[in-house]
Amino acid sequence: MKIRTRSALFAAVATASVATALSVPSAQADPIIGSPQASVTEMKASVLSQIQGRTFGWQLAIAQNGQLKVAASDGTAVSQADNNGSWVPMKPTQRMELASVTKNITAVATMKLLRRNGLTVESKVWPYLPPLWDESKFKEVRFKHLLTHTSGIKQALAAMANPPKDNSWAAMRVVVENGTQVDSQRAYKNANFALLRVIDAKLWKLSGGSGWGPVSSLNHTKYMLDFDRKHIFEPAGLYNIGCIPTSTTTGVRSYALGSNQTSNGAVFGTNSDECAGARGIALSSVQLLQYLTHLRHGSIINPADLETMDQLRAGWSEDANGGDGGESGVLDGKPDNTLSPGAYWHGGDLYGSSNRELHTCAMTFDDGTEATLLINSAIGAGDPGEGPTQCGILLRAWTAAKS
């Protein structure tokens, strides 16, 4: 059973360096029959025990029944080496690139835009592709195929002699004109959601978006961000949301495992041509939690569309960034929530030069709990054979906190 509540503003969180209005819905939930609610105190303690000494910096936020319960952080956001000898501690209100967690937001945008245009996940995508693209080999692709990574794009790219090196507008044209075999085995590929970025821009243009003329390679991310802000973020009380440009040198940096205050990091960002489809949106752990609570308990999406997302695991990971919830995090082909029914999540990972890494996770549970975890380094090895992942950490913490 999923908890539904009415949306209301209830809190504000501020730090010395960052002030963020935190608005999440109030608690007026249906009871969960026969299902004990996780202890937030125990869940936080479990997360801390799993990551203590294994990361350079982290942010954690937990909500329950639509109310913020935990906003915690520790470690370093910017080292002394990167800030003229003065280190910057990590705070739960500092924005970081979400990496592939952005796909969940893109899925929500797609579901809302389908409804605005009188379409469904069964609708074919080719009528909404750019007019100069040859869609003759892409006629059978439906929205559900892109949303669930069953379009066959990964398999088609693997068979190409010279596949695209990025997920830009030009690369998506190559994907479309190359063609694909739909209803292929689910195979996670960024290009599915990068293509949704292009298509969603057209759907927003057709249903009210304006200001930049015909949708093109130069403006499609502007259309995408405009829709996300007006119809997802602002209704959730979040403002000025966007992507971190690749040229940015300020803000939270990412580091290698074992870094110290003499280590140099790098700000991970996304270029404007690839922003807001498969990756790129930047939020703090508290802001990401605010988005999740409004997604589950608020009104930013039609309940029937959220139900469709859950049933298809559209915008939710399938055997990625957390395995199936087992202790090993092994990608074994089973659905993500085999061991924890009612758990839905998406994780994100970015890897840069000098072993710098960033890991993110957004997770929801059917007992009314939502949690986010952002880590700006590699994650140290856990017990032999575990290989902890950010989503696996949250899932194990929630499971332990329910027992």
Image (tube, rainbow, N blue to C red):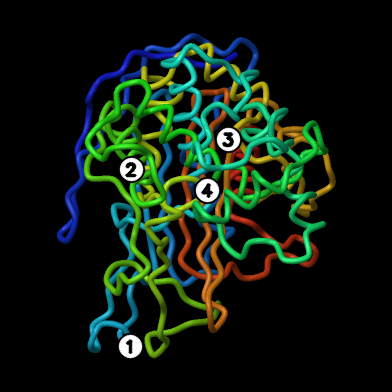
Q: Quadrant of the C terminus?
A: top right
Mark 1 or mark 4, which is nearer the start of the sequence?
Answer: 1
Tags 4 and 1 in contact by the CB under 8 Å rule? no
**Of marks 4 and 2, the one in the foreground:** 4
CA–CA distance between discs 4 and 2? 19 Å
Q: Amino acid at mark 3?
A: Gly
x, y percentage for residue 121? Answer: 61, 20
Secondary structure at numbered mark 4: loop
CA–CA distance between discs 2 and 3? 18 Å
For disc 2, the marked residue is 287
For disc 1, the marked residue is 81
The image's mark for residue 278 is: 4
Q: Amino acid at mark 2?
A: Gln
Out of 75 and 345, give the one closest to the viewer: 345
Q: Amino acid at mark 1?
A: Ala
Q: Amino acid at mark 4?
A: Ala
> What residue appears at the point 71 percent right and 33 percent down from the top-left corner?
337
Q: Residues within 10 Å of mark 1 (few under 14, many from 20)?
A: some
Q: Residues within 10 Å of mark 4 (few under 14, many from 20)?
A: many
> What residue appears at the point 49 percent right and 28 percent down from the top-left corner?
110
CA–CA distance between discs 3 and 1? 38 Å
Mark 1 or mark 3, which is nearer the start of the sequence?
Answer: 1
Q: Is residue 281 above or below residue 137?
A: below
With 253 as the anchor, is 326 left or right in this view? right
Out of 112 and 343, give the one closest to the viewer: 112
x, y percentage for residue 288? Answer: 39, 42
Mark 3 or mark 4, which is nearer the start of the sequence?
Answer: 4
The image's mark for residue 315 is: 3
**Of marks 3 and 1, the one in the foreground:** 3
CA–CA distance between discs 4 and 1? 32 Å
